[in-house]
């Protein structure tokens, strides 16, 4: 697409009444969105999910609305319509920050748009950019660096004679394997299932293909070269493209540590917001060329062999760890509301303020930061009080909330002791 073609967007402005955020999900990222709305507008968010999990439980800024089965799209959509009908006169904004929930919203857009601002891509563009294989193809076409990639298509894996595509000789082990579309992988179950696999030899890859085919997976998997370096080589980008096609928000962060549980592998656990213009320019090029609108969250790794920025994927939504942007002084919800609800053009912002964002104890974090200069920067930010934890909110600090946050930090220590007890050179 050219830079003059942009997604059609809804112009829903239900009324001039009070703003009401409605958010799907119940994880730490959902609470972060509710906190950002509360900080910017003083409003409570309605959270729709299958259970009021710890991050959103016992909160003064969240009203939990439950469905019997939080994995059933029909129940979620019906509940969203029911909630909306009970809030006549309010300006409803619908948010989600997991891929499959975004897909649910997009697939049921016609039912939801009469009530809500639905700030997500069209189904067509969502399918293109949320697929890691297609994402890599787009990046290569417009000159953005990606790891060398092989695509394994399981569409015909249930048919006699199907054989997986071999890995070309030029791509050497170890390799990384992951689902091209997390939505396709969401409900597939098999022994040893992970979000991301490190493959050290051909026999391991062969076994993974057997497990996926046997479990009924019929989507695509990507196999990529392993870019050297530990978690501190990772970078994160959050962007917002308004309904006019203008990129009004860009924020980059230097990842210090990622989560290492099988289901959470790759999610940042600690970052320092840092303006990295060469990387941001590549993100800008991608957003412009594809005609993107709304929030985007890029995962990038610095290749220590040549210093290039290797783009892994773009999440078609704001990220789970979105609060790092708010903490750095650019509340993303303000960019959304002023654009989609108020109809105002917002002056573009590229975030420059440095903040340490961490959902793990600082002492644990420093165990995994081997570079002395980087560790010194972390300590300096801690000493200066330039730190943020999305769940630590002074205006939502009831006894049960404080106890939960304390236990969550202790639990992080346990998880790292179990799944990543010592720093490695690859992050695996």
Image (spheres, rainbow, N blue to C red):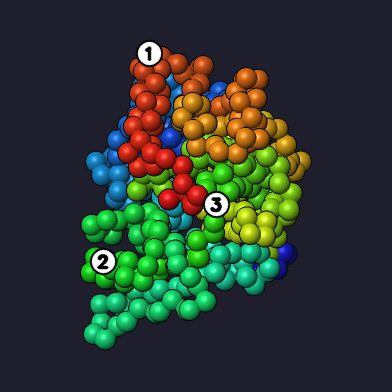
Quadrant hosting residue 30 = top left
Regarding mark 3 in the picture, which secondary structure is present there? loop
Residue 17 location, x and y as percent?
Answer: 56, 31
Q: Are marks 1 and 2 in contact (CB under 8 Å)?
A: no
Q: Earlier in the sequence, mark 1 or mark 2?
A: 2
Quadrant hosting residue 310 = bottom right
Residue 59 location, x and y as percent?
Answer: 40, 22
Question: Which sits in the foreground, 22 or 427?
Answer: 427
Q: Earlier in the sequence, mark 2 or mark 3?
A: 2
Residue 357 horizontal side relative to residue 251, left or right: left
Q: Is residue 306 above or below residue 408?
A: below
Q: Is residue 23 above or below residue 154?
A: above
Numbered mark located on residue 211 in the image: 2
Nearest to viewer (mark 1 / mark 2): 2
Residue 227 location, x and y as percent?
Answer: 54, 59
At a point 44% along the width and 76% down the height, the residue shown is 167
Q: CA distance from mark 1 to mark 2?
A: 46 Å
At a point 71% along the width and 46% down the height, the residue shown is 276
Residue 80 horizontal side relative to residue 357, left or right: left
Number of numbered callouts drawn: 3
Q: CA distance from mark 3 to mark 1?
A: 41 Å
Question: Which sits in the foreground, 114 or 63?
Answer: 63
Q: Are marks 2 and 3 in contact (CB under 8 Å)?
A: no
Question: Which sits in the foreground, 171 or 49?
Answer: 171
Mark 2 neighbour density, 10 Å: few (under 14) some (14–19) many (20 or more): some
Q: What residue is disc 1 on?
A: 399
Can residue 44 be seen from the camera position used here? no
Quadrant hosting residue 261 = top left
Q: What residue is disc 3 on?
A: 229
Can residue 424 be seen from the camera position used here? yes
């Amino acid at each position: 697409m050219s830079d003059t073609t942009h997604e059609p967007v809804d112009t829903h402005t239900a009324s001039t009444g009070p703003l009401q955020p409605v958010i799907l999900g119940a994880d730490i990222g959902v609470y972060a969105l509710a906190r950002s709305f509360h900080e910017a507008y003083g409003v409570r968010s309605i959270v729709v999910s299958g259970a009021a999990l710890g991050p959103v439980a016992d909160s003064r800024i969240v009203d939990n609305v439950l469905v019997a089965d939080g994995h059933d799209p029909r129940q979620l959509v019906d509940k969203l319509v029911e909630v909306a009908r009970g809030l006549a006169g309010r300006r409803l904004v619908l948010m989600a920050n997991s891929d499959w929930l975004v897909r649910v919203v997009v697939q049921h857009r016609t039912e939801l748009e009469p009530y809500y601002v639905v700030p997500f891509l069209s189904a067509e563009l969502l399918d293109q950019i949320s697929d890691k294989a297609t994402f890599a193809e787009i990046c290569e076409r417009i000159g953005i660096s990606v790891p060398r990639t092989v695509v394994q298509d399981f569409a015909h894996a249930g048919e006699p004679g199907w054989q997986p595509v071999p890995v070309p000789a030029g791509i050497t082990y170890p390799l990384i394997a992951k689902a091209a579309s997390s939505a396709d992988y969401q409900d597939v179950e098999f022994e040893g299932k992970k979000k991301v696999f490190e493959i050290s030899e051909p026999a391991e890859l062969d076994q993974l293909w057997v497990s996926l085919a046997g479990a009924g997976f019929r989507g695509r998997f990507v196999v990529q070269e392993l870019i050297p370096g530990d978690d501190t080589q990772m970078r994160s980008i959050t962007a917002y493209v308004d309904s006019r096609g203008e990129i009004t928000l860009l924020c980059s962060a230097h990842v210090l540590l990622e989560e290492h549980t099988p289901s959470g592998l790759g999610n940042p656990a600690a970052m320092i917001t840092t303006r990295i213009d060469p990387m941001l320019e590549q993100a800008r090029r991608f957003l412009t060329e594809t005609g993107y609108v709304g929030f985007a969250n890029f995962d990038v790794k610095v290749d220590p062999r040549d210093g290039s920025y290797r783009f892994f994927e773009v999440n078609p939504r704001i990220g789970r760890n979105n609060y790092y942007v708010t903490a750095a002084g650019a509340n993303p919800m303000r960019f959304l509301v002023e654009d989609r609800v108020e109809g105002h053009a917002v002056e573009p912002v590229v975030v420059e303020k440095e903040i340490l964002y961490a959902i793990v104890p600082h002492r644990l974090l420093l165990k995994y930061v081997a570079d002395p200069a980087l560790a010194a920067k972390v300590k300096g930010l801690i000493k200066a009080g330039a730190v943020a934890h999305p769940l630590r909110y002074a205006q939502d600090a009831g006894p049960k909330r404080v106890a939960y946050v304390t236990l969550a930090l202790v639990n992080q220590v346990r998880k790292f002791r179990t799944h990543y007890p010592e720093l490695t050179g690859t992050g695996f």
